[in-house]
Amino acid sequence: MTTAAAHASVPTMRERVVDVGVALTLELGWARVTMGTVAERVGVSRQTVYNEVGTKAGLAEAMILHELDRFLGVVTEAFDARPEHGPGDLVEAIRAAARGVLELAQDNRLLHAVVSATHGADTELLPLLTTHAESLLAAAKLVIGQRIAAYRLDLDEAHLEAAIDMVVRVVLSHVMQPSGPPGRTADDIAWIAARVLR
């Protein structure tokens, strides 16, 4: 292993703090996670934790965005696996991306912990995925918009933005509340996308 490769695998302090925040949330529940507990588990001062993520709300957002990066990685791989750029290829990329995201969501313990928290302070995390999800939606739409830019589509910019917004919101709603197996849901989303993009 080269020195550069070894260095790349060492998590940053922020990553360590976020990873511990996730682990503690799964272990104790979000309501019982404190910045002091995070600091103790990481092996640093509480001030160091505050310097990395700010308040507990900042830690929550960092945790959600960390998970979002994993989901967007799946989306990027699905689009990059399709070298052609016609409308039909885009529908297949959307199908693969939706399926990958929904499959990842099925096994995501943090997501399940957030969605299933229905009482007390644990509901503090839920708005980050729902009503206050602007940063999450913006990040997802940006990644998909960048990938779709390569496709030859007969859509003006306003309608393309509306189509991207629709796909992102539909996938997110199925992440939060699945209505069927990932493959079938991805097929349904692709069917809708095909009609919007034709």
Image (tube, rainbow, N blue to C red):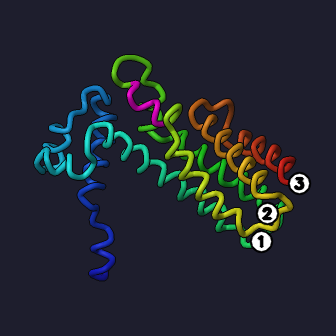
**Residue annotated with mark 1:** 84
Q: Nearer the viewer, mark 3 or mark 2?
A: 3
Q: For the N terminus, give its image quadrant.
A: bottom left
Ranked by sequence position, the earlier of labels 1 and 3 is 1
Answer whether residue 124 is magenta in the image: yes
Please name the residue shown 41% across and 50% down the image.
66
Task: Say which label, 2 or 1, has the lower sequence index.
Answer: 1
> Is the residue under label 1 in contact with that under label 2 (CB below 8 Å)?
yes
| Front: mark 1 or 3 | 3
Rate crowding at label 2 as few (under 14), some (14 to 19) or many (20 or more) other CA atoms within 10 Å.
some
Q: Earlier in the sequence, mark 3 or mark 2?
A: 2
Residue 172, image x, y percentages: 60, 39
SS of the residue at dot 1? loop
Furthest residue toward bottom: 2
Please give left or right for residue 125 compared with residue 192 in the image. left
Dot 2 amino acid type = Asp
Compared with residue 161, is residue 8 higher up or lower down, i.e. above or below?
below
At x 61% / y 52%, what residue is drawn? 141
- The majority secondary structure of the magenta stretch comes to helix
Name the residue carrying label 2. Answer: 89
